[in-house]
């Protein structure tokens, strides 16, 4: 196992992005997701609400030059009948920016949505899949070469879905590929990005110790032109070795620690990663092409 720490992988761009988020003044910020489109920067993240109590709210920030606009994403979707926004992640598809999120842990089963944020706000579309799990967290959305919405549904095994029917409030998905291989304890982290005709995302490796778990990251590459051949990079990514031991503040009693990857984008020099640290902090780091 090769572990690469990301804490010191900083540059001017990562510092600027972190400052932009911290300047909101919100507390307990974690799990940032970042997309750039039309010279604007879009960011979602989770943080305490104004009362600084749980449940966490989700927020949506737009940086346009020197102007920064902040929205409470949780409040933004309530008029659409959705009261909980958990694990928001941004996706750039064609000329638009979307957000996907779930409705958290609900004993009876939660819901997962895909919603357009830019250039205009769209209705949050319920994502329906007949064989879905009772609790859904992350699907990795992307466009096919025919501009059909697809999703990486699972890494264990690799399952790819495609929209069969689209309605104003709903997207109905069907399964178009399932691998014969299993990748035990791997789950989807970031939304995928496409370059060199391959999907790139950061997956989470869950490690269990005495029925509690910790999360570390690994780059996953899926070849969309060769029957969805999947490869896992040899390196694991964490914020720091110290972060692996967790923090005194525990928002999740079943968690030892987590470097929770929520953002991945391609840069001219490599990959930019956004992630939460033990659900109490965040970081943005860039790794060079030869570092992964």
Image (cartoon, rainbow, N blue to C red):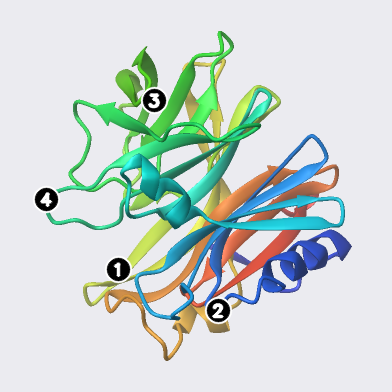
| Callout 2: SS | loop
Q: Residue furthest top?
A: 146
Mark 3 or mark 2, whichever is nearer to me: 2
x%, y% of residue 234? 57, 51
Q: Which numbered disc flags the more N-terminal residue, 4 or 1? A: 4
Q: In front here: 162 or 198?
A: 162
Residue that mark 1 sits on: 208
Instruction: Compute the Cα span from label 3 to label 4.
Output: 25 Å
Tell me if residue 140 can be seen: yes
Q: Which numbered disc flags the more N-terminal residue, 1 or 2? A: 2
Vertical position of residue 229 compared to residue 218: above or below: above
x%, y% of residue 269? 84, 47
Residue 225 placement, left or right of 171 = right
Residue depicted at 37% across the width and 49% down the height = 78
Asked if labels 1 and 4 touch by Cβ distance under 8 angstroms, the answer is no
Mark 1 surroundings within 10 Å by alpha-carbon count, few (fewer than 14), some (14 through 19), many (20 or more): some
Residue depicted at 85% across the width and 42% down the height = 268
Tell me if residue 204 can be seen: no
Residue depicted at 76% across the width and 52% down the height = 63
Mark 4 surroundings within 10 Å by alpha-carbon count, few (fewer than 14), some (14 through 19), many (20 or more): few
Vertical position of residue 146 compared to residue 34: above or below: above
Asked if labels 2 and 1 touch by Cβ distance under 8 angstroms, the answer is no
| Callout 4: SS | loop
Instruction: Compute the Cα span from label 4 to label 2.
Output: 30 Å
Residue that mark 4 sits on: 108
Residue that mark 3 sits on: 160
Residue 173 placement, left or right of 32 = left
Mark 4 or mark 1, whichever is nearer to me: 4
Residue 247 placement, left or right of 22 = left
Residue that mark 2 sits on: 27
């Amino acid at each position: 196992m090769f572990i690469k720490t990301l804490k010191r992988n900083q540059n001017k761009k990562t510092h600027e992005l972190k400052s932009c988020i911290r300047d909101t003044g919100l507390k307990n910020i974690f799990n940032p997701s970042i997309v750039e489109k039309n010279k604007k920067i879009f960011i979602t993240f989770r943080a305490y609400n104004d009362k600084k109590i749980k449940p966490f709210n989700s927020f949506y920030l737009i940086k346009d030059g020197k102007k920064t606009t902040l929205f409470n994403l949780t409040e933004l979707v309530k008029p659409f009948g959705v009261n909980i926004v958990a694990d928001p992640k941004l996706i750039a598809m064609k000329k638009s920016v979307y957000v996907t999120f779930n409705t958290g842990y609900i004993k009876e089963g939660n819901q997962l949505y895909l919603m357009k944020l830019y250039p205009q706000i769209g209705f949050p579309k319920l994502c329906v899949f007949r064989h879905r799990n009772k609790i859904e967290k992350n699907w990795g959305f992307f466009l096919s070469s025919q501009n059909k919405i697809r999703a990486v549904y699972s890494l264990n095994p690799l399952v790819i879905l495609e929209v069969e029917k689209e309605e104003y409030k709903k997207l109905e998905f069907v399964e178009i590929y399932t691998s014969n291989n299993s990748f035990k304890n791997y789950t989807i982290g970031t939304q995928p990005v496409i370059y060199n005709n391959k999907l790139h995302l950061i997956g989470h490796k869950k490690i269990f110790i005495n029925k509690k778990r910790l999360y570390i990251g690994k780059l996953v590459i899926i070849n969309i032109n060769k029957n969805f051949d999947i490869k896992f990079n040899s390196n694991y990514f964490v914020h720091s070795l110290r972060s692996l031991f967790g923090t005194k503040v525990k928002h999740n009693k079943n968690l030892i620690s987590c470097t929770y990857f929520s953002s991945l984008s391609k840069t001219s020099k490599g990959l930019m990663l956004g992630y939460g640290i033990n659900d109490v902090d965040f970081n943005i780091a860039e790794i060079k092409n030869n570092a992964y």
